Amino acid sequence: MSAKAITEATGKDILNRHLNQHGAGAAACRFATVNAETDWSKLSVDHPWLLTTPLVVKPDQLIKRRGKLGLIGVKKSFEQVKQWIGERLNKDQKIGNAVGKLRNFIIEPFVPHTEAEEMYVCIYSHRSADTILFYHLGGVDIGDVDAKAVKLEVPVDSTLSLADVKTTLLKAITDASKKERIAKFIYALYATFADLYFTYLEINPLVVTADNLYILDLAAKLDSTADFICRPKWGEIDYPPPFGRDAYPEEAYIADLDAKSGASLKLTILNRNGRIWTMVAGGGASVIYSDTICDLGGATELANYGEYSGAPSEQQTYEYAKTILNLMTSSPKHPDGKVLITGGGIANFTNVAATFQGIITALREFQPKLVEHNVSIFVRRAGPNYQEGLRRMRDFGGTLGIPLHVFGPETHMTAICGMALGKRPIPQVASVEFSTANFLLPGGQQAQADLKAASEAEGLGSDESDGLATNNHQQQSKSNGSNLNFNRKFFSNTTKAIVWGMQQRAVQSMLDFDFICRRDEPSVVAMVYPFTGDHKQKYYWGHKEILIPVYKKMSDAIHKHKEVDVMVNFASLRSAYDSTLEVLEFPQIRTVAIIAEGIPENMTRKLIIEANKKGVAIIGPATVGGVKPGCFKIGNTGGMLDNILHSKLYRPGSVAYVSRSGGMSNELNNIISKATDGVIEGIAIGGDRYPGSTFMDHILRYQSDPETKLIVLLGEVGGTEEYDVCAAVKDGRITKPLVAWCIGTCASMFTSEVQFGHAGSCANSDRETATAKNKALRDAGAYVPDSFDTLGELIHHVYGELVKTGRIVPREEVPPPTVPMDYSWARELGLIRKPASFMTSICDERGQELIYAGMPISEVLNKDVGIGGVISLLWFQRCLPPYVCKFFEMCLMVTADHGPAVSGAHNTIVCARAGKDLVSSVVSGLLTIGDRFGGALDGSARQFSEAYDTNLHPMEFVNKMRKEGKLILGIGHRVKSINNPDVRVKIIKEFVMENFPQCPLLKYALEVEKITTTKKPNLILNVDGVIATAFVDMLRNSGSFTSEEAQEYINVGAINSLFVLGRSIGFIGHYMDQKRLKQGLYRHPWDDISYVIPEQYN
């Protein structure tokens, strides 16, 4: 939902900070808020006026008409206020049908005034303007404001003047001074309203005394989607739930998940102890499932409303499902058991198998509790990879121990509601799809061309036979004198589009649709993406690969592709406004589809105005787009190819539809294809409050299209656009049969207000309810079913009548076209297999949380395993004991650096001074590591291990190495000696001796040291030697490795890893040190080089 109500305290705080900046001249609102945790003594210290002023107190929980309900205490002392609140705090209060507890209160100073000084001001936004209402008599007895108040419309993208306020709104104010003050206040209030993205702001009363203006009662709503613009001005906003419904931590958790995700995740708890729980995919589908449950008598038992959509990840779906299952199984058991309805329409792009895997994981986790609560589960879903998703769910159901019934697109979307509530029999055997799409076999490309020629000879597959696309546009422009023209055809089989955004999957989907529609050329000719340079992107056209140019600038794309007249805009909610405004500057663009959800309403309204001026049609925002079967589709509309084929979208039918919901448009494709000869065009106008085009815009297009024989409208609760359709049916502008249904009939059955999945699906008056709209449509002459359940049957009935009367001649079916399947999708479906190019067993970044060797990164941090623990996970795939992790960290610390003179540091320094970057400089140092410098750990471990394992006496080992002419790696130091010991060696040796369970190899090395130092005092056990031998002791004696694993790590060179990692720290330090000291290019001095050039050239 975009327009969200805020508390009176929040609204007054915002006005206190911003209203007078616009010259309102109003008194600041003084108030204090109280809840169960309030410390009254601290409150009186923070607000000393509480003790000296008569007070007004009232609940602050979005309750309307508090004065009429007796919920305002007036002219009370501080002690009386405490008593008044104490009598009501956490007590049940019934308001209308809603029962809730009073928990939050606001206290304000009492403002002495007369009734004549009370006035009413309200500002609210709608599609084309902001409306300001003013009435010179305010207060609790104002009555019917709409009938009494004076109205002033401020069109979108225009400004308000003081003169307009005075002449239009303030005619009843005769005092010139007072009129001036009120006019300035209303002017400033409107400026604040617009600047801070309010959608509703009501003050009743506004008290205008001789010396000041006071805002007494206030109700307000903000456009929450404008948070990214207004947060610095708003501050942190807490949107309270409507009265009668408590805010649950689970709702806040899902809201937080939603905010962090590109998907949509919504949850509203209606009845904590209800027995009917839903987990529905899709904003529109979620409303329809709630409608059906309520229609079947389940309103009082419906526990929640919610939806997940927009391709959530497996992890996100798991978190969502886990939250619902926890709520379901933590409430009291129900004597009849509980039901979980996991439903949804036919997805456009959500991977059903992936989301179902997340649900299955949650179900597995809660299996004992589900059995305990006697839960029955009903599943219906379709869309990308649904066959695999349903198969997994069926297979899992056999192990769950409770009834789990699974259905696909062969079952009507809401049929499982009747089954779950015992109103409909459960089929024993469901029809299951075991195939998907049609494969294009070798030679199929030529067969495609032959089929295309044959279908065109029969008059199928072409949408330009009568030239209406051009002629209608010219005639309409002449007839109505308006630049805006929706009677033209939006799409044909030659439509060309530009896609804004790097949406490779959506573009490929459009090209695949073009191919199966037997178009001559792809519909997507270019892409625009400002964040990369101009280049070309590879896509498939059938089984051939083609290149589509990607431009950094929109102007380049437009100028190089003059045939384009459609833009599909995948820009984010933050940039969709600017990118759409930019493309409106190019007259060749006639249609723009805006996919993003959550664009601030003020921006959308400005886009609509600008598009209307230029005669450009906007589809969206918050839409999947639309489809013209046999011609063109927008983005991901229609879903995967198997659904496009099942719904016969590869060729035109006779039925056109318009809906708000993108997900439900896909379900309509399915319903219409089964009930009729198919879809001729379908548009999802989008779920926001102000879609760029309206139901009527498209219905009138369908009315003027001779190929469209039947129109279907799927409206919803909220807004009044459906009444325009009623008027058009009544006055004869719509003469074709219209089948209509408005979803959201359940809203009137809930005791508190529920905001459904779409921003616009919330009724602000009885007239905006789905029930009222359905009645109006039926009364106007439209065909209206009793419920969504019977929508398909009614469409089939009306279609049958049209066929009987000859108004529709069913099109002869052509063989469904064959289509190649992407390799990646074929693998996803399990149709093919291929060995992976890489294998990994230490880290997995695919889920919501990074995992190190099975341990989530949050656990890694919470357990404080340190860098040693991370090494144990990533290097050895296990959690090693704390003393081992400490040993690793000590090794890193003591090997981090050994001064600038050693070869590795020297190389790094020279490289840094030559102007090389960090990575190059560090790598140059690392490349010096070997047996002669730093890299002796592996060799040392190998030599000492072999000697120890073959039972060589230390003296025998020393003599053997001398006889073979080999150095003992790990023995010897250039500077340190027995008389000047290396402290690093001492520290590690003592730690190992004290903490390791056994260290036989280290002790063996120390015996060798005793022998070598008798020959030369600097032949000591050095850092390499002590780390190497201790490392082998750790591998062999910590109990974490088998002897085979220990030997393998020695053989693969794992021991050297500690020196490489540790010394990298020092190399980086030397690089930064040289840069910080601004050292110039290094040149080695001549006097430090011995030149041994031959005296004479031979």
Image: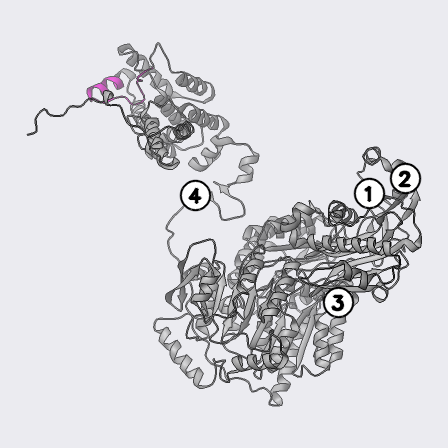
Amino acid type assigned to the residue bearing label 3 in the image: Glu
Q: Which mark is residue 768?
A: 3
For mark 2, does the 10 Å Cα neighbourhood hold few (<14), some (14 to 19), or many (20 or more) residues? Answer: some
Left or right: 177, with 911 as reference point: right
Nearer to me, 472 or 1030: 472
Q: Which mark is residue 31?
A: 1
From the viewer's perspective, is the residue at label 3 or at label 2 nearer?
A: 2
Which residue has dot 4 on it? 841
Q: Separation of disc 4 and disc 1 at Cα? A: 60 Å
Q: Separation of disc 3 and disc 1 at Cα? A: 35 Å
Which residue has dot 2 on it? 53
Q: Separation of disc 3 and disc 2 at Cα? A: 44 Å
Screen quadrant of the N terminus:
bottom right
Q: Secondary structure at mark 3?
A: helix
- In primary-sequence order, the first of circles 3 and 4 is 3
For mark 4, does the 10 Å Cα neighbourhood hold few (<14), some (14 to 19), or many (20 or more) residues? Answer: few
Nearer to me, 14 or 449: 14
Left or right: 562, with 255 as reference point: left
Q: Separation of disc 2 and disc 1 at Cα? A: 12 Å
